Amino acid sequence: MSPSTSASATAARARALGLEPTVRPLFAIEPVEWQAPDAARFDDLLLTSANALRHGGAGLAALTSLPVVAVGEATAAEARDAGFRVAEVGNAGVTELLAALPGRQTLLHLAGADRIDGRSGHNVEVVVVYRAVPNAASLQAGGAVAVVHSPRAGARLAELVSARSATAIAAISEAAALACGLGWQSVDWPESPSDSALLALAARLCQSPAL
């Protein structure tokens, strides 16, 4: 299968840092049939992944009146391109983004079937619009830095790679790092769970003389 848009964008940013990425998507993203609820019931549209916009289909048009609160600038940019007004962008995760919203709001979360729901005092209604299906792939990751974007990806990587001692892990978060399991050359994650911080970490790890 061809690399996802997200993976390709990450690879392009890695090349801009002087890295030589090899794209091995662990999952294929598929749309899920869904019906858009009445937009008037909600204060905001919560988007935690650009995949909701890439695979949301025709139902998105019924929701463009809702201001978007987005996790990550990449998701916010996709929302603007799709005709949405972005009201808030968070770069530290969904829980932190929701905590920054004033009052008690009612949000519609267009999400994947596997997700991390943020903790908040808001009313959040989840509608699943896509799912990630594991790719049937084998990996030879020795002598490299593996970049891991989610706990589910970390668990999948652990299933596919048995010879781990020559591979360093750069994970988006502590949860993603722990999901990778034990036996790797090293496991690290940035203070801020953003793609830019993750790639900066990967660049530092690539300079290790052990790789």
Image (cartoon, rainbow, N blue to C red):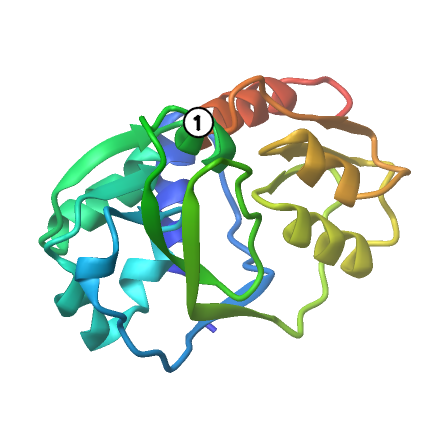
- Can see residue 5? no
Q: From this viewpoint, which residue is outermost toward the bottom?
A: 33
Left or right side of 131 for 156: right
Q: Quadrant of residue 70?
A: top left
Front residue (pair 125, 115): 125
Residue 184, x across and y down, in percent: 84, 36
- Rate crowding at label 1 as few (under 14), some (14 to 19) or many (20 or more) other CA atoms within 10 Å: some
Tell me the residue at 75%/53% (across/down): 155
Left or right side of 167 for 66: left
Residue 139, x across and y down, in percent: 71, 59
**Residue 33, placed above or below residue 43:** below
**Residue 208, placed above or below residue 10:** above
Task: Find numbered disc 1 in the image and state the secondary structure of the residue it sits on.
Answer: helix
Left or right side of 8 for 22: right
Residue 95, x across and y down, in percent: 50, 33
Front residue (pair 177, 101): 101
- Where does label 1 land, which residue? 99
Q: Quadrant of residue 190?
A: top right
**Residue 156, placed above or below residue 74:** below
Residue 182, x across and y down, in percent: 89, 39
Q: Amino acid at mark 1?
A: Ala
Q: From this viewpoint, which residue is outermost toward the right?
A: 183
Front residue (pair 66, 89): 66
